[in-house]
């Protein structure tokens, strides 16, 4: 059988050594592409338990892997740069081999294009992307340990290190430019918008309600609660007669019930539940009427508390601190008063907790909440909120500023305010005189 002349010429024109070297290089590059592509899936599929296992593994590879994972953007940049360089090299070598096997004029341009595009792309996708990534999803730990040192070396090797830094910085700039600006409006701007919208002719009470609504979500339960020292409660071991007498004195519709100490709240006793049992005897088991209490943390926002009250159809919650101890109670009325102002009923005590001596001097009870002081002074309280730590009462704030429990006659200065202790004992500050000084020009600027 005679061999066609064109195939004889083609075979004679091929250099076996160059062809073998080209195929070996192509194979090595495909393996490199597979390892780099697989490492991307391997590193970024590691969960918290896998990272903990890496930290507990005492080996150089695990230490290197942890360092790479600490900077995920740089790690991803290294993988992408290495992968692209290898893929470009594969295309170049493949084109070289294609030109050696099929010189110009020996095969049609269509066939050559199909070989260069379809075959090479198929090999690159199958062996350089799909198979290694499937393997890496099932063997992420092993692949990460295997590739940690090579990737670390590539990241430090010029020009890859230069490209890496440029890529990371460039993407950061693009990310910042493309980032959607937040539409969160500062509270101060909302307050100013309310004032502009309502105008100067608007009623002062309406303005105050709108301003309180704007600042409603900033306040937490601790700021409006009734502290435990002022809470009226009943011990669960009390007799029915004692309970009846106590309820006559306090005149509340709901009252907490505790066992031994106020930190052990058993529940809430509703007065309406006792009405059908007014004629019961001394041994009546009133404890069976106690309802389950609703507990909330001190730092819960009052807008969230309002939603909870609405959903659970409750009017009272027990406030607990981070240790589980009882800090006080908060009611639906307390929350509503932050919007509409004080809500007085027939049982409220009309005694004021402060006295206004003149426009610049006031006498406050030490237990006065800071929020109430802001309302009396008609200030937003931003300076106080930024300066305070854990305190929510005027006495607590003054003690924080002084760093000690103050004695009668001692003074504390804060901003353009002076606080003078009018009454105190060894445990707490009872009464404070507050003096407002004109602000200096520097302070106003």
Image (cartoon, rainbow, N blue to C red):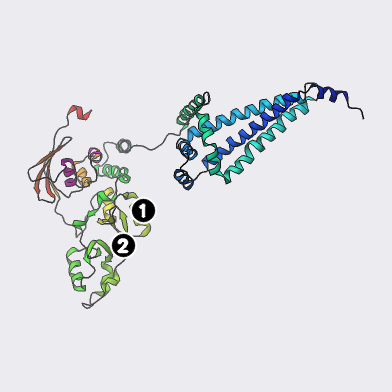
Q: How far apart are marks 1 and 2 (CA)?
A: 17 Å
Q: Residues within 10 Å of mark 2 (few under 14, many from 20)?
A: some
| Residue 338, image x, y percentages | 27, 48
**Which quadrant of the figure contains the N terminus?**
top right
Q: Residue 307, which numbered label?
A: 1
Dot 1 or dot 2, earlier in sequence: 2
In the rendered image, the residue lying farthest to the left is 409
Name the residue at 73% across, 25% down: 17
Q: What element carries label 1?
A: helix
Name the residue at 66% across, 25% down: 92
| Residue 167, image x, y percentages | 50, 27
- Image-quadrant location for residue 125: top right
Name the residue at 18% across, 40% down: 401
What's the magenta region? Answer: 383-409
Q: What element carries label 2?
A: loop
- Image-quadrant location for residue 232: bottom left
| Residue 127, image x, y percentages | 66, 37
Residue 359 visible at all = no
In the rendered image, the residue lying farthest to the right is 1
Residue 182 placement, left or right of 154 = left
Q: In this view, does 182 lie above or below 158?
A: below
Name the residue at 52% across, 34% down: 149
Q: Residue 293, which numbered label?
A: 2
């Amino acid at each position: 059988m005679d061999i066609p002349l064109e195939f004889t010429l083609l075979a004679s024109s091929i250099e076996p050594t160059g062809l073998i070297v080209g195929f070996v290089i192509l194979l090595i590059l495909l393996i490199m592409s597979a390892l780099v592509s697989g490492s991307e899936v391997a590193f970024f599929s590691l969960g918290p338990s896998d990272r903990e296992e890496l930290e507990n593994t005492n080996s150089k590879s695990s230490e290197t892997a942890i360092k790479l994972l600490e900077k995920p953007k740089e790690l991803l940049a290294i993988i992408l740069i290495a992968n692209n360089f290898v893929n470009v090299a594969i295309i170049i070598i493949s084109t070289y081999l294609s030109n050696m096997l099929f010189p110009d004029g020996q095969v049609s341009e269509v066939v050559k294009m199909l070989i260069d595009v379809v075959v090479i792309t198929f090999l690159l996708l199958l062996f350089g992307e799909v198979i290694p990534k499937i393997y890496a999803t099932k063997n992420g730990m092993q692949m990460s340990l295997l590739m940690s040192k090579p990737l670390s070396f590539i990241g430090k090797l010029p020009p890859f290190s230069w490209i890496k830094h440029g890529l990371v910085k460039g993407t950061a700039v693009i990310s910042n430019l493309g980032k959607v600006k937040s539409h969160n409006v500062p509270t101060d701007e909302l307050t100013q918008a309310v004032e502009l919208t309502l105008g100067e002719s608007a009623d002062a009470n309406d303005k105050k309600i709108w301003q309180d609504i704007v600042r409603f979500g900033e306040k937490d339960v601790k700021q409006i609660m009734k502290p435990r020292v002022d809470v009226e409660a009943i011990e669960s071991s009390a007799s029915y007669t004692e309970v009846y007498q106590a309820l006559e004195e306090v005149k509340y519709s709901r009252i907490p019930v505790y066992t031994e100490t106020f930190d052990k709240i058993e529940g809430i006793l509703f007065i309406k539940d006792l009405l059908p049992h007014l004629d019961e005897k001394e041994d009546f088991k009133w404890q069976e009427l106690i309802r389950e209490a609703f507990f909330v943390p001190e730092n819960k926002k009052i807008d969230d508390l309002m939603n909870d009250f609405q959903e659970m159809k409750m009017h009272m919650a027990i406030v607990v601190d981070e240790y589980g101890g009882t800090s006080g109670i908060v009611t639906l009325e307390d929350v509503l008063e932050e919007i509409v102002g004080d809500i007085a009923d027939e049982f409220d005590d009309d005694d004021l907790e402060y006295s206004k001596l003149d426009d610049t001097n006031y006498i406050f009870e030490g237990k006065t909440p800071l929020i109430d002081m802001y309302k009396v002074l008609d200030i937003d309280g931003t300076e106080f909120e930024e300066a305070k730590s854990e305190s929510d009462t005027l006495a607590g704030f003054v003690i924080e500023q002084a760093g000690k429990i103050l004695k009668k006659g001692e003074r504390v200065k804060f901003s353009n305010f002076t606080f003078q202790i009018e009454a105190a004992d060894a445990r707490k500050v009872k009464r404070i005189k507050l003096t407002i000084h004109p602000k200096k020009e520097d302070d106003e600027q």
